[in-house]
């Protein structure tokens, strides 16, 4: 579906812009400028207002980013379980820093707060899929799934 | 009624009152920052927090309703500490360059810092370090100074229905930005400047042209000529410590001469001329099946708005230039000729209640004199600065009068300064032109006042002309949507971008409440009453310009110099 | 010896959550039928009498809240389920929804009947896409079986904002806006979603409702602590052997949770501190371990049961380091609407970082105390008011950790 079709399908959903943005990110991994402009049109809001929403939520990005979004939980339970080591391993393995994307556009690295999987910390998610008890040693295998 | 005790004072206030209102009743002023008398309650600055007996949490006085038996402390040590700490937090993120700030001495945050004795801020100074936005010739933004009160956002989106401003990010990274974080020029900003009035600090202001004026005055080969809009006099006194409407016109003219203007003329002259041109345009449209309803075109913020949001209705706009631009093209042609001055030597300065006029003057099409018709536009606030800079004592200054040929005006021009005034002025003239009889009572009071939308009907020889007036752009939207839907019952619509009309313009002395706008409106109608002539077509200098130069309304010369055309702005980020 | 009592997790592991027939076979939706046979006021009275209090953190009497919405006159009312479980260390709502989604739907439908609402929303955090799927499946099945009748439920997804756990911010987010808290009053039962009377209850709260209707208020009120009866699902994280969840009666003590259910601290290390209720919870020292987890008991020691997260730290942990991390959480999650939270959370993190890196002085601790104190009673919503709690309680109770890191 084109972004216009995606947005049109949420037109009559009250408060549907947030879900529409999720659907767009499912396709583009971020919210390209034209999708926000079109969302404003569809939901009959000023562009400034649509942008307010797009930049409020941590799962939305208005900047281009890698296709596979890796989010590393840094909340306290993951922190004490060694999240910093996982962060370092991911940065080393992908050759980028937190908040950056790989040059081939495959991966984006982001920190996140708690993702609610605290039974087995540290936790990372890739495109929403959860990986538990992550250690630096497990990183190459996890990344391989997306290469 | 609800019984409450505030700082030990017992009182009874209406149900639904806030602590802030109740405190006002008993003469206690609670400090505020985000509160605005004409806006929704925001309660986001938390400066007005007070102690309510029985509650550990402090309550924001602006939002907390009173309840029966409520006991409030507005200045307990706990409250004072909280306010001081909150101010320290806000100030630690706010550039402390008050001495260089456009709002120095007229800043709500500065006042609070003074009131709460903020000395050494315990928090480390950290400002956003962002560049100022000087992308428009009218309004600048300094995002570093923004205190996130959001009053500008409400003004832009709710009062004006523009929606150029919004928030970006959240938490400590939150900022107010033009659409999609772009600069103002790329946003749908119409440059009305109402956000400037809303801003408690110096985060938004007018682009100043005082330096260019001083340079022009200093150049002996340059003839500096000024025009001044009708809404300026009624408000500029506020800048030099006078009451609203107090400034005498003849003393203001004298002051302008002292500042160094070579000739002092009045935009009112072209306001009268506008009535002749626009009135005849309306009659022509009515009789020849032209596009109706016709919209007035003297408010440049409105023109920007129409070009941005209603490009399909541009043909409904009167082709008349605004009085400022009519003046600009005539001063370097007709007047220069009359005065035997080389037009290229003329530096044409316009003093306006308006920020959008700065943009209008810079439009590339505004050069029908062969030069840039208006060289610079100063706001009423900049005039105030010039008056203060010049050390003029209005008690002592000798009165003076306007220079000839483009300085005479009528009461009809004066009322251009208030919402409904253009309509009333037009009706005074159109009535007499069509009916060929004298209008006994020139006061069309139905067009006056601060209501959002006003409407009236005039019977002209059996033809009922329906008119409407929109006060502010959110109200304009309502009328425009009606026109777009083909459901507008009107023939003629006056639209002023700013609430109250030009007296509430974006360039006027900082105006926090609509009450002030109403007082200025009253001042306008007093001035109208005092004018010997109150109908535009009776302006003697207007008669002369038609006899000697323009020949007839809507004639060849008029088209060349006094009329214009509009362009869809095709803005992406609307 | 304290024992688990499973009320909200009564069907955990016993049914296939994706099969409504499983739920129906063990008496599912019978409470809804029973509720609908009751008079609305009688039903609300029953819930009130059970003394069920909100499990989302505020601990407000659930039936009382429903009564407000019932009494409000409106053409439309809403039931909203707060499934924006964002407190670090908390995943109990996910466990309920993943394993027994129909319990939630049934609880919401009972509420809908009680207050006169025919529309419900579940606001599920964006981090739980798999839960959203399960809920949507359950809703489709419930519709197919027509068990909900005229009560419609829709799942709305969040997009990463802890503050949306605050009920008015959640409402804003359902409306498609920035998730910023509203000024109260008006409270949601009077004017909430789209300005209509709205009940917002947590997943766990709704999950209790069918049991209360089924077994009666007296049964429920007899479990746990009298003023905050029932059970609480707690989730154990940090330095504890059993990093898992338990549903325990509310009169269970912290010590029992950590040492009995949690199996104590790994290795031979000693207990140092426990934070209860999520990131905004107080840090509790060993001397307070015999406090019951019930709402009021926790409040009496300057803490809060909150979401039921139990985050345990052993003697090797550096409190200042952990609090620095906690402070960054609030800086990340402040919505930015009110000044003391927007600026205060950032300053709090800045000062904690300074202390954590050994650059801090005693004056910084004084300033932290003042800042935290002011935030705790000046901020617009619970996020900003609670954000300083971990800082303030650790400065008070674990001052040695702070002093050890002073410049």
Image (spheres, rainbow, N blue to C red):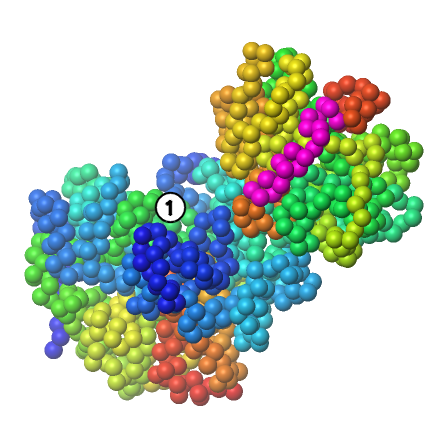
Question: Callout 1: helix, strand or loop?
Answer: loop
Which residue is nearer to you in this view: B95 or B467? B467
Q: Quadrant of residue B43?
A: bottom left
What residue is rendered at 23% in x and 81% in y? C289
Q: Nearer the viewer, residue B303 or C160?
A: B303
Q: Is residue B394 shown left or right of residue C211? A: right
Seen at 82% across and 20% down, the residue is B547
Identify the magenta region. B518-539
From this view, report whether residue C401 is shown above or below residue A52. Answer: below
The image position of residue C242, as x and y in percent, is 24, 74
Say which chain tag 1 marks.
C
- Residue B11 seen in this snapshot: yes
Is there any visible trace of residue B138 in the rendered image?
no
Based on the picture, tell me whether residue B533 belongs to the magenta stretch.
yes
Question: In the image, is residue C145 part of the stretch drawn in magenta?
Answer: no
Q: Position of residue A134 (x, y in %)?
A: 38, 68
* Number of on-image labels: 1
Q: Nearer the viewer, residue B270 or B102?
A: B270
Q: What secondary structure is the magenta-colored segment mainly?
A: helix
Residue A79 vs B397, above or below: the answer is below
Quarter of the picture containing the C terminus of chain B is: top right
- Residue plotted at (39% across, 85% down): C399
Residue at the location (65% across, 64% down)?
A: B98
Snapshot quadrant of residue B63: bottom left
Crowding at dot 1, Cα within 10 Å, few <14 / some 14-19 / many 20+, comes out as: some
Q: Residue B206: x, y in percent?
A: 67, 50
* Residue receiving disc 1: C175
The image position of residue C78, as x and y in percent, is: 26, 45
**Left or right: residue B332 compared with residue B362:** right
């Amino acid at each position: 579906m084109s972004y216009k079709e995606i947005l049109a399908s949420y037109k009559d959903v009250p408060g549907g812009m947030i879900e529409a943005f999720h659907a767009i990110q499912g396709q583009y991994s971020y919210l390209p400028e034209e999708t926000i402009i079109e969302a404003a049109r569809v939901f009959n809001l000023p562009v400034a207002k649509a942008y307010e929403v797009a930049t409020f939520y941590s799962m939305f990005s208005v900047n281009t980013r890698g296709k596979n979004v890796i989010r590393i939980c840094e909340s306290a339970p993951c922190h004490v379980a060694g999240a910093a080591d996982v962060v370092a391993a991911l940065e080393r393995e992908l050759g980028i820093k937190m908040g950056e994307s790989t040059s081939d556009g495959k991966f984006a690295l982001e920190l996140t707060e708690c993702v609610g999987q605290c039974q087995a910390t540290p936790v990372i998610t890739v495109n929403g899929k959860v990986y538990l008890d992550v250690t630096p040693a497990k990183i190459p295998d996890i990344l391989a799934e997306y290469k | 009624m609800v019984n409450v005790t505030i700082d030990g004072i017992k009182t009874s206030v209406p149900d639904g009152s806030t602590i802030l209102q109740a405190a006002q009743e008993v003469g206690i002023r609670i400090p505020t920052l985000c509160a605005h008398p004409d806006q929704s309650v925001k309660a986001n600055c938390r400066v007005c927090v007070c102690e309510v007996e029985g509650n550990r949490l402090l309550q924001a006085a602006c939002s907390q309703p009173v309840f029966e038996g409520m006991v409030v402390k507005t200045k307990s040590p706990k409250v004072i500490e909280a306010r001081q700490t909150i101010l320290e937090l806000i100030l630690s993120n706010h550039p402390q360059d008050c001495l260089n700030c456009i709002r120095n001495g007229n800043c709500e945050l500065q006042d609070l810092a003074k009131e709460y004795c903020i000395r050494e801020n315990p928090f480390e100074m950290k400002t956003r370090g962002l560049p100022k936005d000087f992308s428009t010739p009218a309004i600048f933004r300094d995002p570093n100074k923004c205190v996130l009160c959001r009053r500008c956002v409400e003004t832009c989106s709710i009062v004006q229905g523009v929606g150029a401003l919004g928030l970006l990010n959240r938490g400590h990274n939150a900022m107010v930005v033009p659409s999609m974080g772009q600069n103002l020029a790329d946003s749908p900003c119409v440059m009305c400047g109402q956000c400037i009035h809303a801003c408690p600090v110096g985060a938004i202001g007018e682009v100043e042209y005082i330096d260019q004026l001083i340079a022009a005055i200093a150049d002996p080969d340059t003839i500096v000529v000024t025009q001044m809009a009708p809404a300026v006099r009624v408000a500029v006194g506020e800048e030099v410590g006078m009451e609203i409407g107090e400034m005498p016109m003849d003393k203001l003219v004298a002051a302008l001469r002292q500042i160094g203007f070579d000739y002092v003329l009045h935009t009112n002259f072209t306001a009268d001329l506008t009535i002749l041109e626009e009135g005849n345009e309306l009659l022509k449209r009515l009789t020849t099946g032209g596009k109706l309803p016709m919209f007035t075109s003297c408010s440049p913020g409105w023109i920007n708005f129409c070009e941005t949001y209603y490009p399909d209705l541009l043909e409904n706009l009167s082709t008349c230039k605004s009085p400022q631009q009519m003046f600009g093209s005539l001063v370097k042609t007709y007047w220069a000729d009359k005065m035997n001055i080389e037009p290229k030597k003329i530096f044409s300065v316009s003093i306006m209640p308006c920020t959008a006029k700065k943009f209008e003057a810079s439009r590339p099409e505004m050069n029908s004199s062969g030069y840039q018709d208006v060289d610079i536009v100063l706001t009423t606030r900049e005039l105030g600065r010039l008056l203060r800079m010049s050390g003029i004592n209005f008690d002592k200054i000798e009165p003076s009068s306007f220079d000839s040929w483009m300085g005479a005006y009528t009461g009809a021009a004066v009322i251009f300064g208030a919402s409904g005034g253009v309509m009333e002025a037009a009706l005074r003239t159109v009535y007499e032109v069509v009916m060929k009889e004298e209008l006994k009572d020139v006061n069309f009071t139905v067009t006056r006042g601060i209501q959002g939308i006003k409407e009236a009907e005039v019977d002209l020889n059996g033809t009922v002309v329906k008119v409407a007036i929109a006060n502010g752009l959110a109200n304009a939207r309502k009328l425009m949507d009606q026109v777009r839907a083909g459901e507008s019952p009107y023939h003629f619509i006056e639209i002023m971008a700013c609430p109250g009309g030009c007296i509430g313009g974006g360039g006027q002395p900082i105006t926090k409440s609509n009450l002030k706008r109403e007082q200025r409106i009253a001042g306008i109608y007093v001035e109208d009453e005092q004018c010997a002539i109150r109908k535009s077509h009776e302006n003697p200098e207007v008669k002369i310009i038609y006899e000697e130069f323009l020949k007839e309304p809507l004639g060849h010369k008029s088209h060349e110099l006094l009329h214009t055309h509009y362009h869809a702005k095709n803005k992406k980020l609307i | 010896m304290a024992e688990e009592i499973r009320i909200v997790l009564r069907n955990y592991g016993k049914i296939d959550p994706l099969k409504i027939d499983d739920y129906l076979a063990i008496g599912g939706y019978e409470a809804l039928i029973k509720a609908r046979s009751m008079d609305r006021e009688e039903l609300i009275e029953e819930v009130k009498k059970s003394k069920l209090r909100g499990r989302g953190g505020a601990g407000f009497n659930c039936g009382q809240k429903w009564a407000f919405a019932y009494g409000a006159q409106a053409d439309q009312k809403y039931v909203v389920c707060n499934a924006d479980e964002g407190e670090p260390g908390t995943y109990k709502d996910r466990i309920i929804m993943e394993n027994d989604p129909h319990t939630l739907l049934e609880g919401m439908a009972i509420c809908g009947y009680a207050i006169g609402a025919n529309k419900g929303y579940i606001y599920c955090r964006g981090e739980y896409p798999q839960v959203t799927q399960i809920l949507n499946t359950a809703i489709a099945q419930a519709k197919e079986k027509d068990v909900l009748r005229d009560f419609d439920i829709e799942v709305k997804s969040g997009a990463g904002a802890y503050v949306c756990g605050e009920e008015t911010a959640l409402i804003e987010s359902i409306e498609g806006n920035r998730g910023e808290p509203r000024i109260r009053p008006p409270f949601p039962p009077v004017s909430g979603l789209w300005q209509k009377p709205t009940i917002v209850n947590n997943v766990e709260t709704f999950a209790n409702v069918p049991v209360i209707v089924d077994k009666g208020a007296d049964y429920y009120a007899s479990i746990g602590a009298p003023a905050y009866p029932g059970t609480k699902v707690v989730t154990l994280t940090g330095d504890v052997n059993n990093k898992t969840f338990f549903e325990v009666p509310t009169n269970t003590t912290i010590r029992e949770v950590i040492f009995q259910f949690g199996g104590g601290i790994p290795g031979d290390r000693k207990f140092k501190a426990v934070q209860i209720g999520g990131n905004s919870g107080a840090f509790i020292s060993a001397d307070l371990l015999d406090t019951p987890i019930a709402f009021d008991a926790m409040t009496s020691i300057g803490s809060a049961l909150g979401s039921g997260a139990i985050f345990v730290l052993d003697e090797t942990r550096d409190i200042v380091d952990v609090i620095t991390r906690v402070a960054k959480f609030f800086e990340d999650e402040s919505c930015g609407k009110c000044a003391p939270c927007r600026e205060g959370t950032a300053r709090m993190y800045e000062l904690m970082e300074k202390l954590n890196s050994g650059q801090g002085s005693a004056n910084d601790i004084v300033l932290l105390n003042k800042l935290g104190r002011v935030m705790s009673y000046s901020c617009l919503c619970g996020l900003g008011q609670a954000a300083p709690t971990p800082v303030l309680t650790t400065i008070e109770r674990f001052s040695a950790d702070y002093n050890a890191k002073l410049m």
